[in-house]
Amino acid sequence: MTFSSVLALFGAMVVLAAIPSISVLTVAMNAATSGFLHGVFTAIGIVLGDIIFILIALWGLAFLSETMGEWFFLIKYLSGAYLIGLGMSLWRSKSQIKEIENGVQTSLLSSLLTGFLITIADQKATLFYLGFFPAFIDVSEISYGDTGIVIATAVAAVGGVKLVYALLADRVRTCLNFNLKTTINQIAGCIMIAVGMVLLFKA
């Protein structure tokens, strides 16, 4: 991976991690009800779940590349179409974040498990990463070093954004307003459409 591709991947993951979602709300709620440290441990759980999905996506793509041979280019076009569709959906959608009515977490371990389990429960994340990574990585030549770089980028981007949410929730103890949620969704939608277009027209 080149420095520019790592930087692009980091920027895209930061924007996507900032989308108001069940994970963002869980981090914010735990930080607001139990303190900043609980928000931190919830964020750690979310990142651990993401790392598992990233490993499945990266090495699953490498396996597909080996087995499909010349037909692997179809994955690129299917992935591009999927991301464009996802981006358009994000742009059009109005934020519909459901309220979580969970009690105050009693331990840091429970906060960590909460973040981990809500991430693992969303198996669509693997499909998302399968469509997302080919825009930044040549998956047919993925190496252990590249895998480490992607994981480190995800930890910094996803973990950093969730920590910001935890800090804000701990200090102001309020969630993002509706207008800001909608704006972030639209920005994320544009990012997804752009990544999809890159995949479709990338040589």
Image (tube, rainbow, N blue to C red):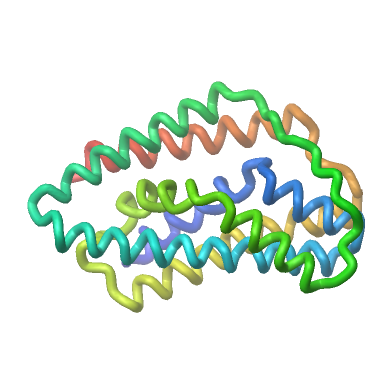
Count of marks placed on residues: 0
Q: Is residue 158 above or below residue 148?
A: above
Residue 69, percent from left and from top: 10, 56
Q: Position of residue 203 (x, y in %)?
A: 17, 45
Q: Position of residue 88 (x, y in %)?
A: 46, 26
Q: Quadrant of the N terminus?
A: bottom left
What is the x, y in percent for residue 68?
A: 14, 54
At 82% from the left edge and 42% from the top edge, which residue is drawn? 175
Q: Is residue 47 above or below residue 128?
A: below
Instruction: Choose top left, top right, bottom left or bottom right for residue 198.
Output: top left
* Rendered image quadrant of residue 149: bottom left
Relative to residue 50, is residue 86 drawn left or right?
left
Q: Is 176 positioned to the left or the right of 156 in the image?
A: right
The residue sitting at 83% across, 51% down in the picture is 29
Which of 36 and 109 lies nearest the eye of the viewer?
Answer: 109
* Residue ID at (20%, 62%): 140
Left or right, 70 with respect to 31, comes to left
**Residue at 65% over, 60% down:** 117
Of all residues shown, which one is farthest toward the bottom? 145
Q: Residue furthest left?
A: 70
